[in-house]
Amino acid sequence: MRSSLIIVGFFILGSLLGYFGVVPTSFLEGDISFYALGALMFCVGVSLGSDPETLKSFKKINPRLLLLPLLTIVGTLVGAAIVSIFLPERSAIDSMAVGSGLGYYSLSSIFITEFKGAELGTIALLSNISRELLALLLAPLFVKYFGKLAPISAGGATTMDTTLPIIMKFSGKEFMVLSVFHGFVTDLSVPFLVTLFCSI
Amino acid sequence: MLLGIGVGYIFRKKNLSFISKVITVLIWILLFVLGLEVGSNPQIVSNLGKLGLDALIITLGALLGSITLAALLWKFVNKTKAQ
């Protein structure tokens, strides 16, 4: 819990500094987040590769658990379509387009802004950020009431980077490989799904 | 990431425990930068309330849908293990 709060704290600190213009926006024009993400993927790779036990466990994933990414996508789309009933200004398709970001806020919001305008793009950004934040904060609750796969499913496309440490902490280190596999598959599906729901 | 796996495998006998600390710090940087992007965009800040509510409702639907299916799969996997 403490590590989740520190992470959220960094986000809030960044928001405040950005809002009050303490940090010049030219800072954002560089590819800092791209390189940080690249470095992050490299480090996750190093920690994977340096642990032969984990590599062996890759082959030992229960074949049924390979279904998890598909269930995450289907569950997300059905859930997003159902709640659009409560959103008179948004169609079910718009809601599913936002949902199909699967927590990958940068890419999905850029795509949706391009196809559907800045308003839905902003919703996509906020929705997918909040998905990631809720996946980080609520991981212990998800494990308790929905089982050890729930934090992985909740994390969507983020389970091979930002939410990975939290999943390993609350579901167990043995779920690392499944989590990376899940993140990899859902990550790849985001551009396709978002484009699909924007073009319907 | 594949490059990282290769490097990690080569140095697997060395002490790589610092890597998890590097991962934590990188996550901090990424979320800090994201916060900067949101905070410095006036269009997002001024509509935050209404758009945020819509976004949150979609998120809750998406989360509930996906974790419900995850719970079903978890039950199914444990059942077949027990048999």
Image (cartoon, coloured by chain):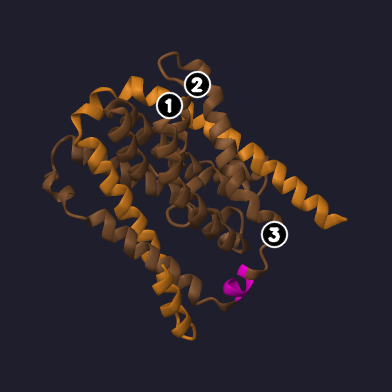
Chain colours: A brown, B orange
Q: Nearer the viewer, mark 2 or mark 1?
A: 1
Residue placed under numbered mark 3 in the picture: A63
Badge 1 crowding class, 10 Å Cα cut-off, few under 14, some 14 to 19, many 20 or more, is many
* Chain holding disc 1: A
What whole-number distance in Å separates the C-alpha atoms at marks 2 and 1? 9 Å
Residues under numbered marks 3 and 2 in contact, where contact means CB atoms less than 8 Å apart = no
Query: Taking B35 as reference, is A178 left or right?
Result: right
Query: Taking B62 as reference, is B30 left or right?
Result: left
Q: Can residue A190 be seen by looking at this rendering?
A: yes
- Amino acid type assigned to the residue bearing label 2 in the image: Ser
Residue placed under numbered mark 1 in the picture: A94
Above or below for A168 versus A87? below
Label at residue A84: 2
Query: Taking A145 as reference, is A39 left or right?
Result: left
Look at the image and give the residue range highlighted in magenta.
A53-58
* Chain holding disc 2: A
Q: Main secondary structure of the magenta part?
A: helix
Count all numbered tags in the image, as a single digit: 3
Q: Is residue A26 magenta?
A: no
- What kind of element bears circle 3? helix
Residue at 54 percent across and 36 percent down: it is A76
Residues under numbered marks 2 and 1 in contact, where contact means CB atoms less than 8 Å apart = yes
